């Protein structure tokens, strides 16, 4: 939170190579920045992690900006991953070794916490940014912007992978395959072929309860 704005007040918009931070209730502009690598066209992907980092990605580059000021923090050039659209998320900053299972009698949110946040864990870790493009996936250190690992989706071709990030596992869908990876090192927990279909679009979408609710945190 800054002196004037709470994270829940903010709406981030990207268009025409620019990124804007707006006040949700009034539409007034708080800040405006160019994409850090001077990109001027196409889709800019956005994701805000729970460390108040704004992750922006386009044309083969993933960048981090300060949510409240738009200040550029780092750029990862994603070497070997082409110059195409990027899907990007970030893991939460809770301990990756622990998973949250809501109690059976849970009524709403995360129990009695009115802020709808998952329970506190004893330790915390820095988030891992997951950037996907051109049939490949990169895990990026959220603090330094350095690449931690890469995963080349077998038979992924030029497809844009889709990703869901949970506390201790990430799910990657690409082409006909789904992979479960360790966000710390990119190692594979399992992989499976989702379909044998030959007709129709090759786009894949995915959802989990935790992954969907995490976006509300």
Image (cartoon, rainbow, N blue to C red):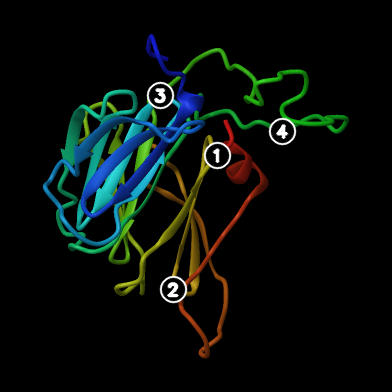
Q: Quadrant of the C terminus?
A: top right
State which mark lies toward you, 1 or 4. Answer: 1
Q: Nearer the viewer, residue 162 or 32?
A: 32
**Residues at marks 1 and 2, CA–CA distance in whole angstroms:** 24 Å
Tell me the number on the disc at residue 174.
Answer: none
Does any portion of residue 185 appear in the rendered image? no
Q: Earlier in the sequence, mark 1 or mark 2?
A: 2
The number of numbered discs placed on residues in the rendered structure image is 4
State which mark lies toward you, 1 or 2. Answer: 1
Crowding near the residue tagged with mark 4, few <14, some 14–19, many ≥20 C-alpha atoms within 10 Å: few
Tell me the number on the disc at residue 101.
Answer: 4
Q: SS at mark 1?
A: loop
**Residues at marks 3 and 2, CA–CA distance in whole angstroms:** 32 Å
Q: Nearer the viewer, residue 120 or 86?
A: 86
Q: Quadrant of the N terminus?
A: top left
Give the labeled residue for mark 2. Answer: 175
Say which residue appears at 50% left-offset and 69% top-offset: 204
Say which residue appears at 83% left-offset and 30% top-offset: 106
Give the labeled residue for mark 3. Answer: 51
Does the CB distance between marks 1 and 2 fall below 8 Å? no
Q: SS at mark 4?
A: loop
Q: In the orientation shown, which residue stands out farthest toward the bottom?
A: 199
Determine the image quadrant of residue 40.
Answer: bottom left
Give the labeled residue for mark 1. Answer: 215
């Amino acid at each position: 939170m800054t002196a004037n704005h709470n994270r829940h007040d903010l709406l981030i918009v990207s268009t025409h190579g620019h990124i804007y931070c707006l006040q949700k209730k009034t539409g007034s502009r708080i800040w405006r920045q160019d994409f850090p690598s001077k990109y001027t066209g196409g889709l800019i992907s956005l994701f805000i992690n729970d460390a108040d980092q704004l992750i922006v990605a386009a044309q083969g580059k993933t960048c981090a900006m300060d949510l409240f000021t738009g200040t550029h923090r780092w750029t990862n050039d994603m070497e070997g991953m082409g110059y195409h659209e990027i899907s990007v998320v970030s893991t939460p900053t809770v301990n990756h070794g622990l998973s949250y299972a809501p109690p059976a009698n849970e009524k709403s949110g995360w129990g009695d916490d009115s802020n709808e946040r998952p329970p506190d864990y004893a330790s915390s870790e820095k988030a891992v940014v997951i950037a996907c493009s051109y049939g490949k996936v990169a895990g990026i250190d959220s603090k330094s912007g350095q690449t931690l690992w890469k995963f080349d989706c077998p038979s992924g071709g030029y497809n844009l992978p889709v990703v869901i990030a949970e506390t201790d596992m990430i799910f990657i869908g690409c082409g006909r395959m789904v992979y479960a990876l360790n966000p710390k090192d990119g190692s594979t927990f399992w992989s499976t072929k989702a379909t044998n279909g030959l007709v129709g679009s090759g786009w894949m979408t995915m959802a989990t309860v935790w992954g969907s609710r995490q976006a509300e945190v």
